[in-house]
Image: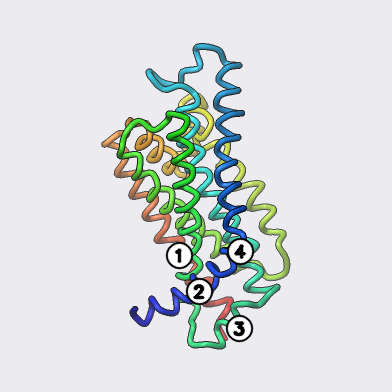
Amino acid sequence: MTALARPTFRVFQRNFLVYRRVWHRSMFFGFLQPVMFLAAMGLGLSKLMGAGAVIAPGVEYTDFLGPGLLAAMSMQTATFESTYPIMNKIMWGRNYEAMLATPLRTRHLLLGELSWICFRVLTLAVVFMIVLAAFGIIRTPLAVLAVPVAVLTAFGFSSSIMAFTARQKRNDTGFTWLFRFVINPLFFLSGTFFPLPHMGAAFEAVIWVTPLYHAVELIRGLVLDRLDLVTAPWHLLYLVAFAAIGFWLADWSLERRLAV
């Protein structure tokens, strides 16, 4: 291992040792969540919509919904793991103070936490893909590429939100605003539940600049074998840029917050 990889792995290992006590519960709920959403929103709502519940030629509503939920799950998991757990390690439990008393540096902490969060999303995305396959939604072997896209999405959200978390000084009030005015609107309004063109050109232009929309479009195209080869590179470039900027902000914010 390199000088950077070894201490980064130790941070990852610490999180894994804690997680292995509850992994079975996490996997159970990771399996239960997509099943419940697809059964209630996909099968149930599509029946209420009637036989014409077709979003596009050959794409029923359940097929449309499943890949969008995978992208949204990546965002939500990354958000939760990057808020209260990180705040606890910074301010309440002061785990990072103890870690920084060793040869670990703030970048090791950041890379270790991001590696762990991406691993968590990777495992959940694999479970999600199994559920999508069980519902008959996956239409091509290339759908497996949706898993790394989900991980890239999680990396971008996690790093950006860790930068936000590192700036919280007194309490967790900022998280309430984050969930209420950023995460929840993105969950409902980024094309997860319905096609964006139905909302009007002006609103579509606003949503186009949000990261979850690009993740939804990429994952849905891969899973349903409807990838637009013209727009797909732009979606991917956006997510890569989002992840790079988020990492830079998180690195800078944690360094300022934890510098001794």
The quarter of the image holding the N terminus is bottom left
Mark 3: few/some/many CA within 10 Å (<14, 14-19, 20+): few
Contact, mark 2 vs mark 1 (Cβ under 8 Å): yes
Of labels 4 and 3, the one closer to you: 4
Residue that appears at 49% across and 61% down = 159
Which residue in the protein does label 2 denote? 11
Rounded to the nearest angstrom, the CA distance separating label 4 from label 3 is: 22 Å
Q: Amino acid at mark 3?
A: Ala
Q: Which residue is mark 1?
A: 115
The residues bearing labels 3 and 2 have C-alpha atoms spaced at a distance of 12 Å
Q: Which residue is mark 3?
A: 98
Quarter of the image where the C terminus is located: bottom right
Any mark on residue 37, and which?
none
Give the residue number, with chain letter if any, for mark 4: 21
- The reply to whether the C-beta atoms of the residues labelled 4 and 3 are less than 8 Å apart is no
Q: Dot 4: what SS?
A: loop
The residue under label 2 is which amino acid type? Val
- For this rendering, which residue is in front, 240 or 92? 92
Of marks 3 and 2, which one's residue comes earlier in the chain?
2
